[in-house]
Amino acid sequence: MSSGIFFGINIGLKALRAQQTAISVTGHNIANANTPGYSRQVANMHTGFALPVPSNNRWAGAGQIGTGVEISEVKRIRDQFIDWQIRAEDGKLSEWETRHDTISQIETVFLEPSDTGLSSLMGEFWDSWQELIKYPEISPVRTTVKDTGKALAEAFRHSYERLENIEEGLDRQMEIAVDEANALLRQIGSLNEQIKFIKTGGDNPNDLMDKRDLLVDNLAELMDTEVNHVFATVAGKTIATGEITVAVKTTDTNGDPAIVNIIDPSLDSGHLEFGRDDLDVTLVDSENESHTLAAKTGEVFGIQKAGNDTNPDSTSVAYYKNKLDTFAEGMSRILNEIHASGINLKDPPDNTGIDFFAFKDEEGNIITDPDNYSAKHLYINPQIEDVGFIAAGYVDDVDDFNPGNRENALLIAQLRNARFSLDGDGKLQSNTMGDLKFETFYQNFVSEVGVATKEAERMVQNQSTLVNQLSNRKESVAGVSIDEETANMISYQRAFQAASRYIQVLDELAATVVNGLKA
Amino acid sequence: MRITNKMLQSNFMQNLDRNKFYLEKIHNRIASGKMVNRPSDDPVVVSRVMSIRSTLEEMEQFDKNMRDAGSWLEVSENSLSNLTDVLQRARELAVYGAGGTLTTEAMEGLADEVEQLIEESIQTANSAYGDAYIFGGTFTTHPPFIFNKDDGGISVEYRGDFKDINYEVSPGVQMTINASKSAWQLNEGEMKSEVFETLIELEQLLRNGDAEAASNFLSNIDDKIDHVLSERASLGAKSNRMDTALERSLDSQVEFSKILSRIEDTDYARAMIDFSVQEAAYHAAIKSGSQILQPTLLDFLR
């Protein structure tokens, strides 16, 4: 058999079809140039099956004759290794973004230097005691002491409440993150099924795989995952089914780390539940067994790091709540001790040991257990509302007391520059060799907020530079270049035009034969 | 390496964002006039600023204390100056009385004047600074000296206490500002002032017409005058010490303010230069971005 004219027309036809398919793929690429998660596709062309045709009457020509072009597959271009890298780094990025968000909010609670912050309120409070030294018998001066004390206590409570608000925000954020993760898991599960179905039919579900990869990317921003392909053995051969399993890190009941598949096509999918208890997230697997999620990166981990109460570090809310508590407890205890030993201005004056500060719970009851003293509950002692109860004086024998006595006010005012240190229980104790003053204690933790914020900011910047570089590499492989597509389009167009011309030539050849024979 | 349009765009946006981030930072410095506006701007500087501000604020309080102490001392000094006048006049009267030439009526008259002098010095002894009586120790809310006159004659009772009143004038440094005990020579056991006792004695012996006793009494009055004068000198010394301390404190406040300004305030010249550099970078980025992002191959195909 020789290559007949009609055989040639067939080559032309196949060429037209192939170029047209390639142009369609180009069109699809251009259309999706800005679609998130889309990876460019190429129509892989290969030469048609050549005809060897060994036979007796074989036309003695050169070699085999090709049968034109065929599209073997439409394939997406993507580097799975970069995907894996990006997911790991993206998880760290969103972890640090969350922690940076939180510490920046904490920073606004302790926004120093300022004329209205805790620091200056404390200064005013000590100043009012200095004034009391000078005018212990004058009621308006006593009222100033009471009022600045009140303002200071309120500032403590307010700062603490704002920290609690930040915690509530983290709680809500976790709720949303868990909902989002569950939605992503459901979609990944259903895409798994569709992909398997199409794969079994022998096609490449490129767009569905892009979609699934995007969902896995999004999931990786929430928590660190381990993604594996599912393989099946069919007729002795191992083939990829196109499905994936998604595993996450958990802690089992013994507290040991364990990796659990949350998506496994062979089982029902698991889901996550937010238990609210210290921001713990529970993974309920297909067998309805619960595991504690132990993410190590991602937003979920970031929220836990910033918001939970165990092992707080200087980027977490609890750390600063504890500091405020230490401060409020220490200051009130030390001041009360001196105040209670003084003598007030009542008639007759007494030294019955009235506290200046008091801790009151939400119902307004005085808290007596020192373990429960928290900045959240700091008030001035309600008795102090009668400023005569402010104990400015001190004498050994109450009978020797006169209203101009100011020894105790002097002792309290000197607390401003008194030295303290932290004892084994983390409580402030008077210590003349200590390295802390009330002021420096507060300054220190404002510095800590600053350093932690800066550090978090730096981490976010570094991490986003890294993610950006990786994204560029990913984009470099998988992204759509308009220029490239335009160039491809022109070459496919030219090929299409040439193939059409070729068919026209063959048509003319055929016409020559047919018309020539007629003549 | 393939470069896609999206890469160009996202890199461009990232760089632009970074430019704007720094622009905003510098602009903040210029607009607020402060190098640091939040702890993370520079934690070390912020904690130094806080500590200097607090020191300054505390110094202002101590200045107030020193000024108030100064006023208190001034009131004391005025009172004692009155007292000196009173004692001088009493001495003059004693000299008249000691002459021995006066009639009983005239001696009586001298005694009456001494009595008035006593009443006058009671007012002085009960002088107050603000609402506080300054010569009663910590007994500040009522006049400490009480004048009594009955058939037995004149008596002056002291009902204050003998405690010092201390102001804090700098961290840990206290200054005693009241002078009752020594100025009025209080006798703790009998709750009496030797100054008044001397005047009362003078009044008594003048009323008795005892010229010789009056003459012998002069040295007694001189003692008291000397004593009050030396007390005034010591008050003056305290006052001076306070003035010097206040001046020194004001000087260091100027120094601290300078340091504060140096670390906290924006160096405008530098900030403006930084701003211009950053602005130039920003504009250049926008310009090159606008030229790189727009064209594609399509623009050049016909």
Image (spheres, coloured by chain):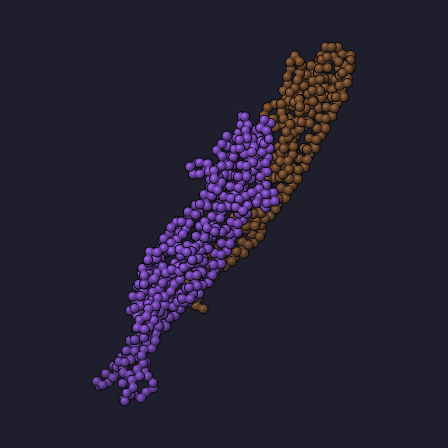
Q: Foreground residue, A16 or B34?
A: B34
Q: Quadrant of the C terminus of chain B?
A: bottom left
Q: Please tell me which residue lies in front, A499 or B41.
A: B41
Query: Image height check: is B109 above or below A349?
Result: above
Identify whether B160 is placed above or below B290: above
Chain assigned brown:
B
Quick check: A75 left or right of B18? left
Q: What residue lies at 45% left-to-right and 58% top-to-bottom?
A: A92
Q: Which chain is purple?
A: A
- Asked if residue B197 is positioned above or below residue A309 in the image, the reply reads above
**Front one among A382 and B17:** A382
Q: Quadrant of the N terminus of chain B?
A: bottom left
Percent of width and height locating residue A510: 26, 81
Residue A33 spot, x, y in % from top left: 38, 63
Q: Quadrant of residue B240?
A: top right
Residue A189: give x, y in percent of width and height. 33, 60
Image point (42%, 61%), residue name: A87
The number of callouts visible is 0
Identify which residue is drawn at 56% across, 47% down: B47
- Kindly tell me whether residue B261 is visible in this rendering: no
